[in-house]
């Protein structure tokens, strides 16, 4: 089945309104189930985000370099829907210490977070999501652990000593439930209240104190055992920990029902076996298999002549498949997750000219991916950094998008399950599937045709400014409000208000935090009448909930990082340790475009009053006084001059006397536009705009009818700086170089046509270094590579 990925959101968001699914009849057929599933799951676009950071451990004063990938949640295609990504950094108390907004172009973004000195030592959670993602369950929101060390603020070890470690034991019968007289595989997951997995042994007893099973969890905290529950019996597990015996109850068995068992064949395929109690499910069972929100197959088993279903591995999609058993009325009975590893995980062909280097030696790195088809390409980000433990891994784009982004709960060290050297990874992964649930949708919502409502519009073209007017403060809610940005390149637009007082407005791409100004046309608007919604209003949830202690073996590594950054900060004027800001092309026009007349006042004799300016120099406009009121007018094709919209730095000024009393020595130029301009229901014959030297209203007080609000603009991405020791001055050669990240490039394009050569230099720091690459092709194939090299002294 071919799925269209045009989706429904462009239509939804043009109106920025709520969308609800039309009512449908109760599901009674396979086609009805498919239609409901596609309408409410497949065709409702969802996004996933992965953020590659240059490292995972930082010292205050350093920069966290980021490369973001926003992809379609079903096919992992880089998508061009959302144009903005929200990134936050939370401490162990759930408080955001950093918040940034990053521009996305064709699903790719780059940015940075400066680790300032006010950030305390500890374990932090980085979270990233688009505005559109806030409409769904928070499971798809990207989360990553970041470790930060502040040399003058050590972790609060007393807090951790006082914490009481509790044993958390969970039992997960395969398929969901224990059923009397039916043999079930029961998965076990044990961890403490700080989220750390525990390796423990337990024994299962019935209520007559008879031993029925034993189990021992691995270092990852998982294991399983088999149990056939009997009518009238209950079961507990006794687990030994710290010299004490703890008792934990198993789930109560159902009197009747169905049990599913999934097993592997010698050929590497899968077989699904179903067992049901007598007298139940006489009309058979429907087996639905879906992968990432797309139904792959629906098979009906009568259970009388067929209770097994063969699942060839080649028929399965990579990642998590959800197997759901339903009765003849399509009510869910049992469920099981299955994971298929990518058959040929893609890794670019990376070749180094050597494996060992000396100080400040050039490294030549060649990249190519011959697996790419003609016309296909891959966007990757590359980091080269000082290794803590060369063989240790981190969560990567494959482990995140194929595993952790699609299931509930936290999977510690998810990269372990994708390490080809891990011979037990298939069995370990199956235990993860047994102990975690699917989170993209809830079958109950699909079957009941639950309405899907849009609360947060997708930022499809630009950042969206959202807020509301306080209806209780208006006799009649206005239909629109004027929105302005003052400056030498100003913006003004009319913003529509819905019946509930809510507004959504696309802002121009701004590269720093700004103030936005609101006003009503010839009326007063107060600060308490308007409020802005924060783009970071997604409720925070940290699955770990508490800070994890620093590993003792990291002490030497952390001390080395700290020493390096202290040296680097001393010479930051030379080494650009926190990157450089690129020169951006400046926008030199206001919202009205090029003016018909531009008067640069420094070219004239300066006068002390605005009135004198218009008398002596301004020939395209005039000041008039009628009925003791002043007004500005412009000349156009009409015989008589027409009323002008008068502005200072792009802000409308309704009171002409305010403009006349403005200090002209603070005005750099005056623009005059003699075309018709409409503001709400008002029509103007032209525009007169006074622009100050800094575009800041000359730091004078604004009129009372203006309401100023701060909004969080887009971050300007910095460029990573790497020295070139072949083209440096003698002074630079004497500057110590102790960079903890040797090289960072967030935007590399690889094709199969030719080798891509990347060059950079080692520093003065000796030791092991890691090369890490994450990326995705334009056809949705995930890319990951990890290797390393060594820097030694006195190489021959």
Image (tube, rainbow, N blue to C red):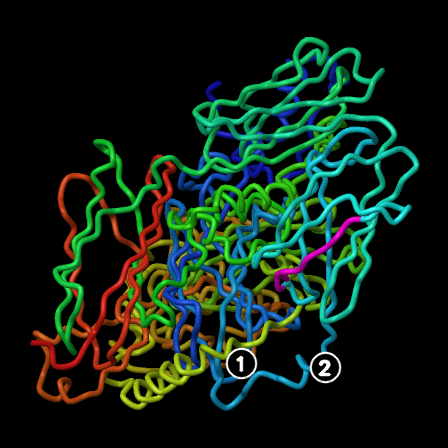
Q: CA distance from mark 2 to mark 1?
A: 18 Å
For the C terminus, the image quarter is bottom left
Place of residue 680 in the rendered image (x, y in percent of width and height, measured from the top left)? 58, 49
Q: Is residue 175 left or right of residue 563?
A: right
Place of residue 679 in the rendered image (x, y in percent of width and height, measured from the top left)? 54, 51
> Label 1: which residue?
121
Is residue 641 visible in the rendered image? The answer is no
> Label 2: which residue?
162
Q: For numbered disc 2, what is the local secondary structure? A: helix
Q: Residue furthest right?
A: 232
State yes or no: residue 505 in magenta: no
Point out the stretch of residues depicted in magenta. 196-204
Instruction: Say if 210 sits above or below 324 in the image.
Output: below
Is residue 429 visible in the rendered image? The answer is yes
> Which residue does the image show at 45% across and 34% down from the upper left?
318
Q: Are marks 2 and 1 in contact (CB under 8 Å)?
A: no
Place of residue 26 in the rendered image (x, y in percent of width and height, measured from the top left)? 77, 18
Q: For numbered disc 1, what is the local secondary structure? A: loop
Q: Nearer the viewer, mark 2 or mark 1?
A: 2
Instruction: Say if 304 sits above or below 410 in the image.
Output: above
State yes or no: residue 203 in magenta: yes
Place of residue 673 in the rendered image (x, y in percent of width and height, measured from the top left)? 38, 56
Q: Quadrant of residue 737?
A: bottom left
Count of numbered circles in the view = 2
The crowd level at tag 1 (other Cα within 10 Å; few <14, some 14-19, many 20+) is: many
The crowd level at tag 2 (other Cα within 10 Å; few <14, some 14-19, many 20+) is: few
> Which residue does the image show at 63% across and 23% down from the upper left?
288
> Which residue does the image show at 44% across and 72% down from the upper left?
57
Sequence-earlier tag: 2 or 1? 1
Q: Of 525 and 538, which appears nearest the observer? A: 538
């Amino acid at each position: 089945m071919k799925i269209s990925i045009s989706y429904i959101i462009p239509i939804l968001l043009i109106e920025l309104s709520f969308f609800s699914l039309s009512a449908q009849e109760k599901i009674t057929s396979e086609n009805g189930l498919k239609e409901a599933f596609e309408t409410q799951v497949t065709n409702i676009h969802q996004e996933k985000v992965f953020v590659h950071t240059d490292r995972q451990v930082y010292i205050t004063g350093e920069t966290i370099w980021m490369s973001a990938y926003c992809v379609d949640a079903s096919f992992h295609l880089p998508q061009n829907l959302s144009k903005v990504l929200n990134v936050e950094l939370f401490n162990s108390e759930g408080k955001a210490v950093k918040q940034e907004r990053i521009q996305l172009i064709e699903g790719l973004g780059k940015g940075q977070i400066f680790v300032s000195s006010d950030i305390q030592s500890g374990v932090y959670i980085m979270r990233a999501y688009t505005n559109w993602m806030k409409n769904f369950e928070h499971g798809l929101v990207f989360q990553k652990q970041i470790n930060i060390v502040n040399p003058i603020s050590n972790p609060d070890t007393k807090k951790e000593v006082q914490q009481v470690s509790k044993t958390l034991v969970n039992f997960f019968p395969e398929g969901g439930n224990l059923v009397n007289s039916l043999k079930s595989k029961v998965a076990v997951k044990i961890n403490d209240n700080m989220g750390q997995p525990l390796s423990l042994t337990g024994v299962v007893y019935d209520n007559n104190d008879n031993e029925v099973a034993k189990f021992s969890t691995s270092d990852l905290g998982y294991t399983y055992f088999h149990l056939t529950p009997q009518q009238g019996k209950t079961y507990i597990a006794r687990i030994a920990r710290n010299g004490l015996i703890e008792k934990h109850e198993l789930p109560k068995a159902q009197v009747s029902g169905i049990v599913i068992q999934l097993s592997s064949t010698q050929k590497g395929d899968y077989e699904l076996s179903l067992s049901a109690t007598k007298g139940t499910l006489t009309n058979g069972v429907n087996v639905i298999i879906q992968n990432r929100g797309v139904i792959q197959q629906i098979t009906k088993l009568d259970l009388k002549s067929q209770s097994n279903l063969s699942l060839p591995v080649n028929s399965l999609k990579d990642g998590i498949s959800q197997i759901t058993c339903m009765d003849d009325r399509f009510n869910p009975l049992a469920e099981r997750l299955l994971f298929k590893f990518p058959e040929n995980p893609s890794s670019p062909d990376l070749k180094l000219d050597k494996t060992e280097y000396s100080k400040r030696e050039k490294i030549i790195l060649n990249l190519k991916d011959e697996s790419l088809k003609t016309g296909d390409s891959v966007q990757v980000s590359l980091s080269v950094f000082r290794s803590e433990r060369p063989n240790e891994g981190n969560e990567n784009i494959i482990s995140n998008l194929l595993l952790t982004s699609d299931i509930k709960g936290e999977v510690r060290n998810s990269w372990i399950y994708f390490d080809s050297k891990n011979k037990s990874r298939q069995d370990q992964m199956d235990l993860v599937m047994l102990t975690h649930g699917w989170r993209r949708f809830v079958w109950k919502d699909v079957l009941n045709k639950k309405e899907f409502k849009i609360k947060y519009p997708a930022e499809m073209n630009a950042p969206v400014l959202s807020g509301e007017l306080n209806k209780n403060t208006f006799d009649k809610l206005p239909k629109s409000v004027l929105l302005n940005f003052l400056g030498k390149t100003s913006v003004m637009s009319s913003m529509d208000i819905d019946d509930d007082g809510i507004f959504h407005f696309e802002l121009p791409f701004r590269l720093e935090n700004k103030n936005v100004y609101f006003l009503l046309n010839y009326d007063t608007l107060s600060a308490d009448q308007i409020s802005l919604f924060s783009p970071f209003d997604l409720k925070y949830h940290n699955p770990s909930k508490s800070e994890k202690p620093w590993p003792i073996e990291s002490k030497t590594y952390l001390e080395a990082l700290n020493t390096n950054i202290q040296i680097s900060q001393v010479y930051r004027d030379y080494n650009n340790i926190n990157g450089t800001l690129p020169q951006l092309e400046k926008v030199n026009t206001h919202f009205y475009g090029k003016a018909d007349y531009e008067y640069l006042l420094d070219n004239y004799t300066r006068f002390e009053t605005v009135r004198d300016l218009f008398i002596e120099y301004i020939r395209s406009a005039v000041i008039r006084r009628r009925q003791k009121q002043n007004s500005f007018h412009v000349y156009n094709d009409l015989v008589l001059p027409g009323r002008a919209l008068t502005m200072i730095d792009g802000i409308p000024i309704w009171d002409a006397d305010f403009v006349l009393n403005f200090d002209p020595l603070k005005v750099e130029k005056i623009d005059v536009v003699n075309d018709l301009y409409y503001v709400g229901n008002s029509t103007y014959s032209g525009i007169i705009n006074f622009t100050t030297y800094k575009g800041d209203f000359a730091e004078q007080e604004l009129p009372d009818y203006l309401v100023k609000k701060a909004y969080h603009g887009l971050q300007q991405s910095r460029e990573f700086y790497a020295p070139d020791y072949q083209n440096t001055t003698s002074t630079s050669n004497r500057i110590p170089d102790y960079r903890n990240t040797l090289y960072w490039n967030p935007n590399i394009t690889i094709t199969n046509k030719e080798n891509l050569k990347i060059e950079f230099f080692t520093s003065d720091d000796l030791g092991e270094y890691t090369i890490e690459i994450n990326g995705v092709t334009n056809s949705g194939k995930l890319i990951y590579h990890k290797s390393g090299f060594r820097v030694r002294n006195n190489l021959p």
